Amino acid sequence: MLQGVNVALGVSGSIAAVKVVELAHELRRHGAAVRAVMTPAATDIVGPWAVQFATDAPVVTEITGAVEHVELCGRDGWADVLLLAPATANTAGKVAAAVDDTPVTTCATTALGADVPVVMAPAMHEPMYDHPGVAEALDRLAAWGVTFADPRIEEGKAKIAAEETVLTEVARAVTPDVLAGKRVVVTAGATSERIDPIRVLTNRASGKTGREVARACYVRGADVTLVQDGPDVGYADVIEVETADEMIEAATAAADTADALVSAAAISDFTADAVGEKIRSGSPLSLDLEPTPKLIDTVREAHPDLPIVGFKAETSGDDAAMVAEAERIRDRVGLAFVVANDASVMGEDESRVLLVGAEGTDPEEVVGPKHAVGGRVADRLATVLAPDA
C-alpha cells in the first residue's frame, strides 16, 4: 500500500508517542521508508534511540546547519508526505499559526510551503480537542489541504487513530486520485440466513478482500459505501446488514447515486423459513432451502447502465474452469469485469485471483496480500470509469 513512499514522521509530546515505534514498524511493513522528527517533549516520552531502531534511520531532534527541515520537506526534499503522529493541541496550533519553535513545527511549515502532503493524527484530552481555538486551528489546516486521521473519542480522551486508519490516510495523501469524484458501492463478507433465534446458515467468507477493495477505492479518491455484516470503518460509510435480502436491498438502494458497484460479498445462495423459538437438539432435522435472488441481477435490472464488478469463487482449482464461469456471469449480467478466485483463500491474508475482462482479452493474474488485490481491482475499475484518463 505504501511501496516506495518516503514518510517523514513528526512526533509530538503526547503520551500517544509511546505508539510511534509500532506505527513506524507498520509503515515500513507496508513498504514505506521512514525518517522521524521529534519535539523535545516527545523525547521525554519515548527515547530517540527506540525511534531510530523502529525507523532504521537517524532521528532529527534539533534543526542544525544541515537544515534538516529543508532536506526532509523542502521542494526537492526527501519526503513524499509528512505525517504528524501524534499531533498535540500545542503542535496543531503552532502549525496553524506558522510558529516554528520545534523541529516538527519547522518541518510542517516547510512542507506546507513546498506543497508536500501533510497528514495529521491528533491526540489529546477531549476538552482540549473541543477547545474552540484548537477546532479553529484544525479547520484552518484542513483549508490548507492538511488531511486528518481523526482520533477515537474514548474515556474522555481524543486518542490517536488506529494504525490502520493512519496508514490509510497516508496512502490516500500520496496515491493518484484516479477515482476522485466517483462514488463506489462495495459489498463484502458473508451473509447469514436465520434458522431460529440462535442458528444461522452462512459461509466462510471473512470480508477481507471486499474491505480491501473498499479501502483501495477510498485511497484513490472515491467516496465509498461499504455494505457488510460488520463494524464501521474509517474509509467508508458502512451499511450494516445480516441477510441476503438485506444486502440486496441496501446495495440496490445505494446504487441509485453510485458510479459503480463492486459485488465482492459471498451472499448466501439459500435461505430457510426461520422459526420463532430455538429448535431443540438431539433429533434429526430437515430444512427446506429456497434460493436467494442474485444481487448483481437485481442491481442490473434497477440500473441498466451501472458499471458492475463481479466476484466468482470456485472450488475446482482449475483456472480454465474459473475463467469459463467468470465469462458466463460477465456475459449474462453485462459486467465490467469479474474477479475469479479459488474458494480456498477465504479467510486468508494472501490471495490469487484472475481478472476476467472483455471478451477476447486474456485474464490478468494477481497474486499477493489481499490489499494488493484490492488495489489492482480499484485501478482496473478506474480504467472502466475513466477509460481515456
Image (cartoon, helix red, strand yellow):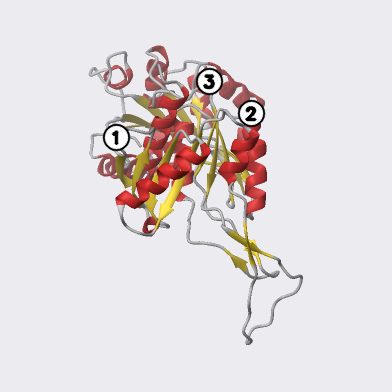
Distance (Cα) linking label 3 and label 1: 27 Å
Say what amino acid the circle numbered 2 marks: Thr
The residue labelled by disc 3 is 141
Mark 3 or 1, closer to the camera: 1
Question: Which amino acid does the dot numbered 1 rest on?
Answer: Gln
Looking at the rendered structure, the number of numbered marks drawn on it comes to 3
Residue 257: mark: 2
Disc on the earlier residue, 3 or 2: 3
Q: Is residue 229 visible?
A: yes
- Residue 3's label in the rendered image is 1
The residue closer to the viewer here, 68 or 249, is: 249
Would you place residue 180 above or below residue 28 in this image?
Answer: above
The numbered mark at residue 338 is: none
Question: Would you call the spot at circle 3 few (<14 residues within 10 Å), some (14-19), or many (20 or more)?
Answer: many
Q: What element carries label 1?
A: loop
Q: Which of marks 2 and 1 is nearer the N terminus?
A: 1
142 to 218, vertically: above or below = above
The residue sitting at 28% across, 18% down in the picture is 77
How far from the left and from the top, in percent, is residue 245?
A: 66, 51
**Distance from label 2 to label 1 (Cα)?**
33 Å
> Is residue 129 rendered to the left or right of residue 317?
right
Q: Are marks 3 and 2 in contact (CB under 8 Å)?
A: no
Residue type pointed to by label 3: Leu
Question: In the image, which is nearer the foreground, mark 2 or mark 1?
Answer: 2
Above or below, 184 against 271 in this view is above
Q: In which quarter of the image is residue 366?
A: top left
Q: Nearer the viewer, mark 3 or mark 2?
A: 2
State yes or no: discs 2 and 1 in contact (Cβ < 8 Å).
no
Locate residue 9, reporting x and y percent. 36, 32
Q: Which of 31 and 263 is in front in this view?
A: 263
Screen quadrant of the C terminus: top left
Q: Could you tell me which residue is drawn at 65 percent across and 35 percent down?
A: 302
